[in-house]
Image: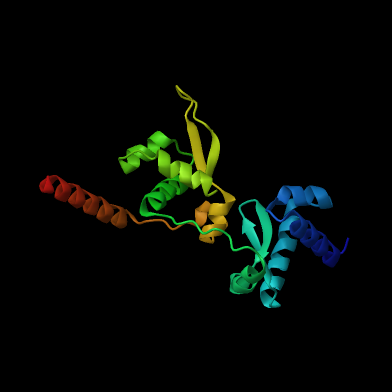
């Protein structure tokens, strides 16, 4: 098949599926190498950006998806139901950041880092589709392991967790000092 027909086939598959499709599945469906699929996807992504389309090609680790460009969202919600917006409280954001940076991680590990119980926060994040169970730890009790989802990547505008910002050792030390000061202030108030 020529490139234009291959791109049209990929577009048809992504449009029909609605959700993300793994690159390996596209390669199998079109009987091509994954590298060829990735080249075609890059060309498609560039075309969607250059030609002023209302959609864009979103890359998510080893998968891709067609989605509406954010600047056209206001028009879309006039027709479609407005999706429920979830409020991420400070507790949920703290828990989510721990999962994002330490994944796969157990509830106990999250609780050790946060210093408080996290059952409610983990359950809410699972309900919101931002984290999911990714397996079990090979340890007594076989605790659940949690990791981020594709919805997390979409929500935070990254294609992989490797794109998340990293803190310098100085920033980490500053945060430790602030936390120690907060703890000391709480102790002094009692």
> Residue shown at 42%/44% (left/top)?
121
> Residue shown at 83%/67% (left/top)?
4
x, y percent for residue 128: 52, 49
Outermost residue toward the top in this view: 140
x, y percent for residue 159: 57, 57
Is residue 173 visible in this depiction of the protein? Answer: yes
Depth check, front residue: 123 or 28: 123
> Residue shown at 23%/54% (left/top)?
178
- Left or right, 113 with reference to 88: left
> Residue shown at 69%/64% (left/top)?
42
Q: Is residue 105 above or below residue 23?
A: above
- Left or right, 97 with reference to 24: left
Image quadrant where one finds the N terminus: bottom right
Image quadrant where one finds the C terminus: top left
Q: How many marks?
A: 0
x, y percent for residue 108: 39, 34
Q: Is residue 142 above or below residue 88?
A: above
Q: Is residue 48 above or below residue 180?
A: below
x, y percent for residue 183: 19, 47
């Amino acid at each position: 098949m020529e490139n234009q027909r291959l791109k049209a086939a990929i577009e048809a598959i992504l449009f029909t599926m609605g959700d993300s499709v793994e690159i390996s599945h596209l390669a199998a469906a079109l009987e091509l190498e994954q590298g060829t699929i990735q080249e075609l996807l890059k060309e498609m992504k560039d075309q969607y950006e250059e030609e002023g389309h209302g959609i864009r090609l979103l890359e998510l680790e080893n998968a891709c998806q067609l989605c509406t460009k954010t600047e056209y969202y206001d028009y879309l919600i006039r027709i479609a139901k407005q999706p429920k917006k979830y409020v991420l409280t400070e507790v949920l954001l703290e828990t989510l950041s721990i999962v994002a940076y330490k994944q796969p991680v157990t509830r106990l590990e999250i609780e050790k880092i946060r210093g408080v119980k996290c059952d409610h926060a983990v359950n809410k994040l699972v309900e919101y589709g931002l984290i999911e169970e990714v397996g079990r730890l090979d340890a007594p009790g076989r605790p659940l392991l949690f990791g981020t989802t594709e919805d997390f990547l979409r929500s935070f505008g990254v294609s992989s967790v490797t794109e998340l910002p990293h803190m310098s050792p100085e920033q980490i030390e500053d945060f430790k000092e602030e936390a120690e000061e907060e703890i000391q202030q709480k102790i002094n108030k009692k």
